[in-house]
Amino acid sequence: MNSFVGVDLGSRTTEIIQLVDGKIRYSEIFETGHNPLPKVKESLKHFENSLVVATGYGRHLISENFGAHRVTEIKACAKGTHFLFPSSRTVLDMGGQDSKLIFLNDKGIVIDFEMNDRCAAGTGKFLEFMAQTFSMDIQTFIQTAQEATEYVSISSMCTVFAESEVISLITSGTPKEEIALGLHVSIATRLHAMIAKIPLEEDILFVGGGAKNDCLHALLEDKLRRTIKRPEEPQMVVALGAALIASEL
Amino acid sequence: MKDFRKMWTELGMDLELHDQLIQDMSNLHKKTHLSQQNRPKSMDRFDRSFHASHAGRVAEILDFRKNGGKMIGTFCIFVPDEIALAAGVLPLPLCGGSGWSVSYADKLFPRDICPLIRSTFGMAFSKTCPYASLEDFAVGETTCDAKKKTWDLLGMKVMEVPQRRNEADRSLWLEEVYKFKDMVEELSGMTVTADTLQDTIKLVNRKRSALRQIDEFRKLDAPPISGLDALLVAQVSMNQDINAFIKDTQALIDELQERVDKGISAYSEKGKRVLLAGSPSPMGYAKVHHIVESSGLRIVADESCTGIRYFRDLVNENLSDLDEMMEAVADRYFGIDCACFSPNSERIENLQQLVRDYNVNGVVQSILQYCHTYNVEAKIIENSLKKIAIPSIKIVTDYSQEDVGQIRTRIEAFAELLTDLS
């Protein structure tokens, strides 16, 4: 068998990658939605003679339904990161439902990790939710933030309380650009507190859907005064890691 | 099954709400304990005792009280059982472990205190705790700030638990233990004598020894009992009649020995061996234990108050002078390595000893939300474990189910880490 498939069923999006002879042959991304199984089943039809490894929030669902092996997204993320950037020792993975900070060794093995628990603060969902408050899609919301020259500080990190704070800012006439940037700054500040402890000589990689946010990336680099690398397709790293793990089974 | 509805009504309970509580507890028990493969058969007894805690056990205590017996509610393993029992008083831990009852505490308590206190009084306030009207009084203690103020709010009796391990605090504690003796003697009208105290010291030692014997099996390469079941046994030990409990554990111990002889493990996989540390898990609460053991890890030791902290130390039973016995009892409790002590280096030493004795690969610190002492001390524990190259993970959670998915991801990743690093 030389075809290996990684399925990352996340809380917001699902990514699928096929590796053949160590090269990416196929990749796919779709919204997870409320019933992801039929879509995953449809995709997996194309890879009948492949070894599949499932990861992400829905890894149990995939392994139970398709008999796939499973690993956590933490291990898969480390694996994918190490493959793309062997010098990376730290990964910041900002997903839809949680943010993780993963520390790996020179072999790509996880040596420690941190993950937010239970609440959406500091996650992709937080910014998506705030974009909705402005009736914007996430890309427009990010662009709006980038247009600001100043920002208002948002003190609440709770998604529900932050919305109240944003609404009172809107009604007091604060420009939407300043609020949008303020929300990005508050997320960046929180992430910064997580990663500020990392030794300076180590490469930090930013992955997950959140890494596609240029505004957030720039704010983080600014706060840390160091370069934070991003892969070309930050959302695919975990699925890639799962496919790589499949190839080593 | 016997119908206890009449008894519950007589006890002034809200039957409809109580049905909800029982349903919730039974469902969780089914999902966690009963879903395990390879359980020892004698665990049936402890399942029954778990279900009896709001039924048959209540009827026993009702009878005991009708015959003049006295009962006190307790909320901490610092309250000395030996002394209450020697005065003919039944001490019964009443800590709540039900997520269902938590919100019923909101009418009196702030939300940002630990789920243990909220669950306990949520049951009392929603009239679903059968013991609320059975206890003569409750004895609180000073192990944390939320508890101290709860006792004030409810006008309860309080034992002052020492916070520093020095001579002054030791004398204070001895004095508190004497005051406790006066308290229970006054309640029952019976005097604690050298003879009665020696008897109850021996009795409680037998109970703790039985629990220790069960733990010994967990040191083995293939433990014949799961961490989840060992937790249930410890939880039941705090509710069931002590003699009945000792009898049931004997049956379990015999079966565990038989399983060891035949090479039967409680686990189908040979997962990494972990130690569970941190806040207590009162009866009804086994969330973290369940997630850990259903993620391929084996909990071979539990250092919490519902684990080894409750039964590690015994009281010297070879004394004949009452004052010497009182001092021996006080010293046994003074050695409890609760996070309310500052500093608490004994806990670190004990933990490291457990890591060696139980051949532990990693430590899971299970902390109840707002349990500040254990939560902050967790960093000291983590650092001390790093020095002996033992990975650890801290889970801060409450009795609700909303964060189970995230906790499972973290625990599974921890299991992967333990495997990949070994």
Image: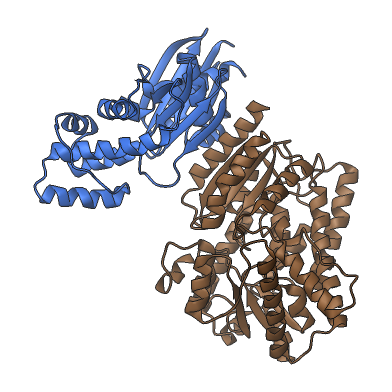
Residue in the foreground of this view, choosing between B118 and A222: A222
The number of numbered badges drawn on the structure is 0
Give the chain letter for brown: B
Q: Quadrant of residue A29?
A: top left
Camera-side residue: B329 or B405?
Answer: B329
Q: Please, is residue B360 above or below residue B47 in the view?
A: above
- Residue A240 percent location from the top left of the image: 47, 19
Percent position of residue A43, x then y: 43, 23
Residue A71 visible (yes or no): no
- Name the image quarter holding residue A108: top right
**Does residue A75 appear left or right of residue B305 in this picture?**
left
- Whether B214 is drawn above or below A25: the answer is below
Q: At 44% across and 66% down in the image, what residue appears? A: B103
Which of the chains is blue?
A
Taking the spot 50% from the left edge, 64% from the top edge, the residue there is B100
At x 34%, y 30%, the residue is A210
| Picture quadrant of residue B304 | bottom right
Q: Quadrant of the N terminus of chain A?
A: top right
x, y percentage for residue B54?
63, 73
- Which is nearer the eye, B418 or A242? B418
